[in-house]
């Protein structure tokens, strides 16, 4: 079906569904179970009857036993809007495998899970130089459009997380699950970008994609390094002390981003590119409660 996902793996995705941590107000009946109480087939709880409540939902069995009026409440089934924001800046082309390759596969898997579960899916690719959007779709029969879109993406340009999230928030005013797949290597930081999404009451999940070469580089000696986005050269002399300091700085960066997300109700998962992909989706994303 696609070079991004093989058929055996796609069959494993069919048993999964997306998870949203907030109430998503949908326009049609879908598969997400909302905390908002309404009318459906699944009982939620009882509460005391108040004057003006719909008498059709009085639990007469309890009234017969306790001589008190209780109202039956039910979970309301609602659809889920899922938007996947994928970073295509130049730095996403770094690593073996490249971070963008991992990001595209993650987007393909999550988009497939959402679409096959009846959720509405859109994909936004962004860098400082350009932005592309795949319009919303629903259902398995439409996932080929998403696969083609993702396969066409390549790394280029700088990173502007805030501009991308601001544009997305202005274009999408309905509550939704917004999944950001990025290395978050932006000189301007990530705080304003995430705050922008939260200010629009979006349910946000961060997939932090970094290569093993970034997390634990194996370098030594006098080197000339090139910035993957600007092309600017940097002359460095690397020894064990510098490598130790670098690894500490990268670890602190990941910890700070994770802490920032968790403190604000944003889901977070570090996704190193050398993690076996099946384990990442079927195990780690489940533990992170993005899918179930």
Image: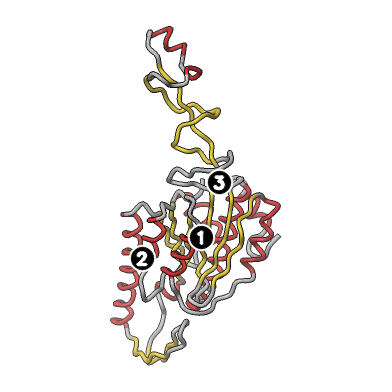
Residue nearer the viewer, 1 or 38? 38
Observer-nearest residue: 140 or 47?
Answer: 47
Distance between mark 3 and mark 2 Cα atoms: 30 Å
Residues under labels 1 and 3: Cα distance?
Answer: 26 Å
Which residue is identified by label 3? Answer: 17
Residue found 43% across the figure and 7% down from its top = 64
Query: Upstream in the sequence, badge 1 or badge 3?
Result: 3
- Residue ID at (41%, 68%): 162
Coordinates of residue 247 in the picture (x, y in percent): 34, 74
The residue positioned 58% from the left and 69% from the top of the image is 132
Dot 1 lies on which element?
A: helix
CA separation in Å, label 1 and label 2: 17 Å
Of mark 3 and mark 2, the one earlier in the sequence is: 3
Identify the residue at image location x=43%, y=46%: 21
Residue 4 found in image quarter: bottom right
- Residue 234, quarter of picture: bottom left
Where's residue 233, x and y in %? 42, 91
Residue occupied by mark 1? 171
Q: Secondary structure at mark 2?
A: helix
Q: Residues within 10 Å of mark 2 (few under 14, many from 20)?
A: some
The disc, 1 or 2, on the residue closer to the chain's N-terminal end is 1
Neighbour tally class for label 1: few under 14, some 14-19, many 20 plus, Cα within 10 Å: few
Q: Would residue 133 be found to the left or right of residue 244 on screen?
A: right
Single out the mark in the foreground, 1 or 3. 1
Q: In x, y percent, where is residue 104? A: 57, 65
Answer with the quarter of the image where residue 117 lies: top right
Give the SS element for disc 3: loop
**Pointer 3: residues within 10 angstroms few (<14), some, or many (20+)?**
many
Q: Which residue is mark 2?
A: 192
Q: Is residue 44 above or below residue 198?
A: above
């Amino acid at each position: 079906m696609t070079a991004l996902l093989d058929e055996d793996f796609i069959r494993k995705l069919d048993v999964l569904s997306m998870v949203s941590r907030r109430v998503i107000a949908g326009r049609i009946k879908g598969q997400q179970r909302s905390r908002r109480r309404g009318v459906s087939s699944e009982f939620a709880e009882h509460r005391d009857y108040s004057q003006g409540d719909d008498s059709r939902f009085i639990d007469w069995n309890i009234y017969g036993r306790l001589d008190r009026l209780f109202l039956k409440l039910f979970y309301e089934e609602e659809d889920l809007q899922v938007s996947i924001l994928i970073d295509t800046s130049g730095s996403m082309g770094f690593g073996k495998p490249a971070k963008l390759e991992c990001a595209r596969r993650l987007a393909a898997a999550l988009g497939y899970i959402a679409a096959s579960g009846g959720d509405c899916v859109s994909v936004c690719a962004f860098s400082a130089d350009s932005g592309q959007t795949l319009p919303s779709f629903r259902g398995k029969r439409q996932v080929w459009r998403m696969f083609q879109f993702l396969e066409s993406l390549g790394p280029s340009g700088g990173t502007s997380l805030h501009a991308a999230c601001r544009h997305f928030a202005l274009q999408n005013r309905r509550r939704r699950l917004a999944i950001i797949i990025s290395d978050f290597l932006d000189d301007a930081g990530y705080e304003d970008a995430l705050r922008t999404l939260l200010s629009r009451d979006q349910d946000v999940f961060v997939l932090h994609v970094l290569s093993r070469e970034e997390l634990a580089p194996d370098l030594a000696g006098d080197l000339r390094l090139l910035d993957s986005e600007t092309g600017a050269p940097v002359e460095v002399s690397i020894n064990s002390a510098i490598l130790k300091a670098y690894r500490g700085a990268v670890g602190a960066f990941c910890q700070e981003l994770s802490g920032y997300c968790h403190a604000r109700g944003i889901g977070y998962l570090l996704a190193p590119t050398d993690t076996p992909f099946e384990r990442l989706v079927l195990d780690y994303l489940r533990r992170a409660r993005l899918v179930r």
